[in-house]
Image (spheres, rainbow, N blue to C red):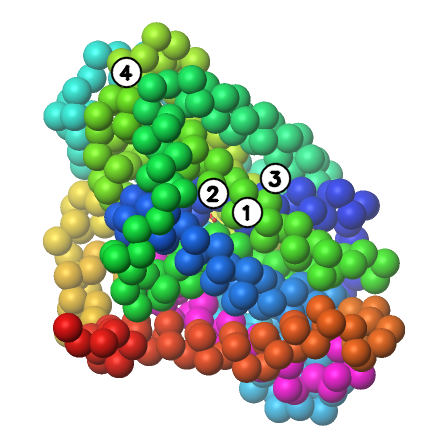
Amino acid sequence: MTTFAHEHWSSRFAFLMAAIGSAVGLGNIWRFPFIAGENGGAAFVIIYMMTTLGIALPILMAEILIGRMGGQSPIGSMVRLARQHKKARLWAVIGWGGTIGAFVVLSYYSVIGGWALKYTTLAVSNAFAGMDGEGSGALFADFTASPLTLFFWHTAFMGINIVIVIGGLHKGIERAVTTLMPLLFLLLLGMVVYAAQTPGFDQALGFLFKADFSKVTAMTFLTAVGQGFFSVSVALGAMMTYGAYLDQSVSIPRSAFIIALADTGVALLAGLAIFPLVFTYALAPGAGPGLVFVTVPIAFGQMDNGVLVGTAFFVLLSVAAITSAISLLEPAVSWAEEKFSGGRRTATLVVGGACWLLGLASVLSFNDWSEFYPLASLGVLDGKTVFDIFDFTVTSWVQPTVGILMALFAGWVLSREDVMAALGVTRAGELWFRLWLFAIRIVCPLAILLVFASAVWPDFVASMVQPAD
Ligand code: PHE
């Protein structure tokens, strides 16, 4: 069977920057703070750390491992591994599900990434100056109400993404992540140092770290698992693709641990950068998706160095989004490279172009189609715009399914000897290895099953896991 010779990472550092770049994204800086805010802060943060280490991390290891064993795009790798190990061809759904899921996520991720770009220009031009809640809300509403403006910024974001991915692994992706990721860390640290000097810092510390478990419900756990999957970039084939480009000499457990730790660290630091501002200016921490685009700009508009701090923040958000978007485009591009002989350039233009086109549906979801609920007849999808449907189906259905399948494939389908050899484990008795195997064989599938069920029958699961009071 022919295999396509993909480029390999030029160093462990390059791989780590790309993988951390994939993990650290809108999920950390836009989604995590508002989800933590909505779920009562510290209790959620603690549960989030537990579920991420216990569930997302083992699957991340499995995903990178499967990728490295296959050495191809997620689809190519799964087809190849199923054949090699004489398993059902059906296991290729891991590859297809992940690749299509990533493609769909990218289509709307690019629209929000476009918002980050637009807000960078607003911050630079001091557009938030003296704004109150109403003004900020109106600014955001006017912006999203215009299909043409959203179209423009979505196009710009996808364009940047395509240009980077066309360059290939070394000249495109590696070059982008090795410059952008250090910049991201610098900006984030700068933001936290700034926030630490505002009067709201103590309150933010309490909010993020003093847990009030009375607000915890089963849903808190399920939200945490879902958020962890999205944030650590598992179960969409992105990490599998990056794993396929990884040399045998790099330790997967250690890398996965670093990636998950860095991702969680950035989410916490993002909280430490944002909430002090929210509290200093007496804004609402539970503002929902508008937290970063509506609430935080009010603080920038009122502080002394608002242009500088605001610009730093939205550049940070844009950089985080771009380095994740790259990894969402790569699975389908690497598959197209293997499948068609047109070369990387054509593959990227066609896949990226198609994804851009699909993104137009999300552009319209915020204005002309804001009351268009195409799958309302399906019940669970009632009241959801195209954008909501894309987000909900992938994060609640595709990711849990692909995640379970990855865990089962690495834990039960591949032989223990093959997995040990691929991981470079020398003694079967090594503690971490046994823990990991237990996690992907038992803990992860069961936990995900619960998440999955909660998406399909939220009320049923809530009543099962929660004592009636
Ligand atoms: N982890 C990215 C974020 O936090 C999103 C992402 C998910 C990227 C899955 C790739 C794969 O924004």
Q: Label 3 is placed on what type of residue?
A: Ile
Spatial CA distance of label 3 from label 1 is 22 Å
- Residue positioned 78% across, 73% down in the render: 430
Closer to the chain start, of discs 2 and 3, is 3
Q: Label 2 is placed on what type of residue?
A: Ala
Camera sees residue 87: yes
Q: Nearer the viewer, mark 3 or mark 1?
A: 1
Which dot marks residue 44? none
For disc 1, the marked residue is: 263
Judge by depth and name the residue closer to the eye, 374 or 465.
Answer: 465
Image marks 4 and 1: residues in contact by CB distance under 8 Å: no
Spatial CA distance of label 4 from label 2 is 24 Å
Q: Label 1 is placed on what type of residue?
A: Asp
Element assignment for label 1: helix
Element assignment for label 2: helix
Which dot marks residue 301? 4
Q: Label 4 is placed on what type of residue?
A: Gly
Spatial CA distance of label 4 from label 3 is 33 Å
Q: Is residue 182 left or right of residue 318?
A: right
For disc 2, the marked residue is: 267
Residue 51 in percent (x, y) is at 47, 62
Q: Magenta span covers which residues?
A: 390-419
Q: Nearer the viewer, mark 2 or mark 3?
A: 2
Image marks 1 and 2: residues in contact by CB distance under 8 Å: yes
Find out whether residue 397 is within the magenta segment.
yes
Marks counted in the figure total 4
Find out whether residue 36 is within the magenta segment.
no
For disc 3, the marked residue is: 164
Q: Is residue 37 left or right of residue 402?
A: left
